[in-house]
Image (cartoon, grey):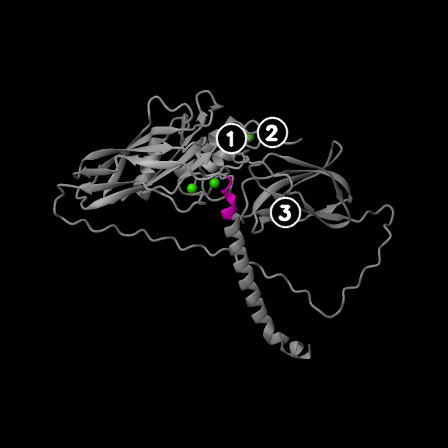
Amino acid sequence: MRYFKENKSRLAPIIVVVALAILTLLSVSLTKKQQELRSKALSDTAVLSFAPTTISVAPNNSFNVSVILNTGNQAVVGNDIIVQFDRTKLTLQNIALPSPLNNTFRTYAPITTGGAFDISTVVTNANITGQVEFGAISFDYATQTLTPPFNGVVSPLATLTFFARAGASGSDTLRFRYDSATSTTDSNVIADPATSGGVPEDILVAPTSTVAVTFTGASPTPVPSATPVPTPTPTPSGTPRPTATPSPGAPTPTPSPLPTPSGSPTTASIILQVQLEGVTVQRPDKTATVTLRQGSTVVRTTTVTMSANAAGIYSTTPITNVTPGTYDILVKGPAHLTRLFSNQTINSGTNTKNLTALLLLTGDIFPNDRIDIFDYSQLVADFGPRMPTAGSLADFDLDGDVDIFDYSFLVGNFNKTGDQ
Ligand SMILES: [Ca+2]
Ligand SMILES: [Ca+2]
Ligand SMILES: [Ca+2]
């Protein structure tokens, strides 16, 4: 004990560093676990493939490649297709959709303000990034209704027209982007949420189909090999804040219970813990609107910031100066339906209320507490390459993109309304 005390000042920084390292490792492994847990209710059966799989093309000529979906005997509600190509050798010219459209996939996203597939944005973006990126969705924009899930083969889902650039030589390989079995930001095929417990699940098998493109009759001028696009340096995840070590020494005096003086009630503060639908790992800070109500009287409406822990559970900043009592608490997240938590007892002092038993349902981009065609329209308008650089409220799972996962949350909640 004496030894420890004498060396405490020297040991303290080491202990903090070790603790931080352990915390970081723990949070990384927890995050991994959450991501792994996310999508294992169903087996992966959906296959994406190309036809044809080999192409010979002379520079300054075009060729077509079809994208084919086989759901592998499971019903699906939508897909994110991401096809990678070498933009120094090929230019995407067009994307043709089947005619007539499949009865399920009646919307291709992103859409224009008029509701049509925004081919020009997809093409422009593809020739900047080398990735053709679009979604095929179980929704009929014309009638504004959801279409039934699809089980079977769609051939083609779309046909891509590429142009071999002048001077292109050697070869290129077209492939579907596939980062990992649990990645939500690569290609996805989403199972009917009714078969996966209401949680959108990607059942895409790692694609093996590619298109081997060989450039023929090229002039012998060697094309300089494509400059590799630098991979972005990963932003370091937030250093966990060291928790303040309570100073040892003087024991905190236990306050003798104060008799509540009549007439001047002590005040309370409230910290709410909530779970946003689709969020199971740490995501950026968000705001929520919290209403405290007694009977039909609104006592307080306030906007609070909330921060997520490693499991994606958000805690609000304290709502202070609340008179102790029983309240109905209504919480509305950034794109979420209002959720009512009734009869919450608030005592004087700090009250941490764990409200995670009920998810805050997502999809209310236009905050009218109803998930409807306006929300849908914004989602398909911000889809894939059309997402504004500042982000979009339609990124419901907060993973940095607007894709078929986000769509699935919206569809799962379509026509639902918030609590009152
Ligand atoms: Ca995926
Ligand atoms: Ca709405
Ligand atoms: Ca997203």
Q: Is residue 5 magenta?
A: no
The answer to whether any part of residue 129 appears in the image is yes
Q: Which residues are magenta?
A: 35-41
Please tell me whether mark 3 sits on a helix, a strand or a loop.
Answer: strand
| Image vertical order of residue 320 relative to residue 343, above or below | below
Residue 134 on image: x %, y %: 38, 35
Residue 215 on image: x %, y %: 18, 42
| Residue holding disc 3 | 316
Residue 17 on image: x %, y %: 55, 67
Gap in angstroms between the C-alphas marked 3 and 2: 23 Å
Q: Residues within 10 Å of mark 3 (few under 14, many from 20)?
A: many
Q: Which mark identifies residue 417?
A: 2
Query: Which residue is at the front of the view, 194 or 398?
Result: 194
Pair 2/1: label in front:
1
Q: Quadrant of the C terminus?
A: top right
Q: Earlier in the sequence, mark 3 or mark 2?
A: 3
Q: Is residue 37 magenta?
A: yes
Q: Which mark identifies residue 411?
A: 1
